[in-house]
Image (cartoon, rainbow, N blue to C red):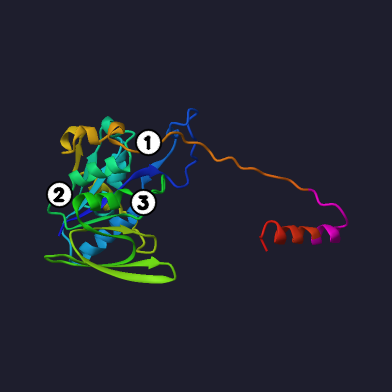
Amino acid sequence: MKIVTLVKHVPDSMANIRVKADGSGIESDGVKFGPNPFDEFAVEQALRIREGGAAGEIVVLCLGPDKAADTIRAALAMGADRGVHLCDAAFVGQDALATARCLAAAIDPDTDLVLAGEHAIDDGQSLVPSMVAELLGWGQVNGAVGLEVAAGPPVRIKARRRIEGGEETVELAGPAVVTCEKGLNEPRYPSLPNMMKAKRKDIRKLAAADVKVDAGLIGPSGSGARTVKLFVAARERKRQMIAGSAQEQAAELVRLLRDQAGAI
């Protein structure tokens, strides 16, 4: 059984993000990047499935700039077998659907299961995995917090996910796409030997010409949505002075917190 994990190259969650003066994007200089944390749940789950005897090869698939190779290496250091890196200036500025087209085209036909994070922390859209499933014509489950996979053929998948007021269990046959939510597992730290092995593992780099997608369906020209401008939301702060004695000030403060702010 072959598992593909989709991994996105994103800014570190603790990084200080600054928007470019023209609003066209973020300043990347000096910002640490790495794997999307939710995608690490996907890599960890793929490894656990293999350790349970239900999987063979684990492939890491990533679309991103040259530096995204480091993100792929991080997943390989966890224990994945090889990587595929879609890297081309033609991909810059494309929307989620164009990205999904490229990723779907790069997934081998003999893949049994695609795992991905429930969403990416940089844009929070949670679109690409579902689009990949639709393009491939596969079943999908989003936001899994429990996952059981039995080798086939066909591969049998039982996923547990949260819904309002409880949980539900979904069963389906592979090939399928499953997105992984926080609580599914605890990603492992790469061991030093695995980090050394990761440097020697194969990462196949694919340009736009290598991906069997019409050139008019990728990049900004192949995107139906575009980012017009990024900006930092304004924070309005108001100051209100409370007069009176200490007891009167305390009573008025409690009233304001209760009646106006709804804090108590």
Residue at 15 percent of width and 59 percent of height: 56
Q: Earlier in the sequence, mark 1 or mark 2?
A: 2
Labelled pair 1, 2 in contact (Cβ < 8 Å): no
Where on the picture, by quarter, is residue 259? bottom right
Quadrant location, the C terminus: bottom right
Dot 2 corresponds to which residue? Answer: 108
Q: CA distance from mark 2 to mark 3?
A: 23 Å
Residue 62 marker:
none
Labelled pair 2, 3 in contact (Cβ < 8 Å): no
Q: Earlier in the sequence, mark 1 or mark 3?
A: 3
Q: Left or right: 175 with respect to 141?
A: left
Magenta stretch: give its range: 241-251
Residue at the far right in the pictured view: 245
The amino acid beneath tag 2 is: Asp
Q: Is residue 65 above or below residue 37?
A: above
Quadrant location, the N terminus: bottom left
Residue at the far front in the pictured view: 224
Dot 3 corresponds to which residue? Answer: 126
Q: Left or right: 39 with respect to 172?
A: right
The amino acid beneath tag 1 is: Arg
- Under circle 2, the secondary element is loop
Labelled pair 1, 3 in contact (Cβ < 8 Å): no
Which residue is more in the foreground, 77 or 249?
A: 249
Q: Earlier in the sequence, mark 2 or mark 3?
A: 2
**Residue 232 highlighted magenta (yes or no):** no
Crowding at mark 1 (Cα within 10 Å: few <14, some 14-19, many 20+): few
Q: Is residue 138 above or below residue 235?
A: below
**Residue 244 highlighted magenta (yes or no):** yes
Q: CA distance from mark 1 to mark 3?
A: 16 Å
Q: Which of the two discs, 2 and 3, sits closer to the camera?
A: 3
Please say whether residue 198 is visible from this viewpoint: yes
Dot 1 corresponds to which residue? Answer: 226
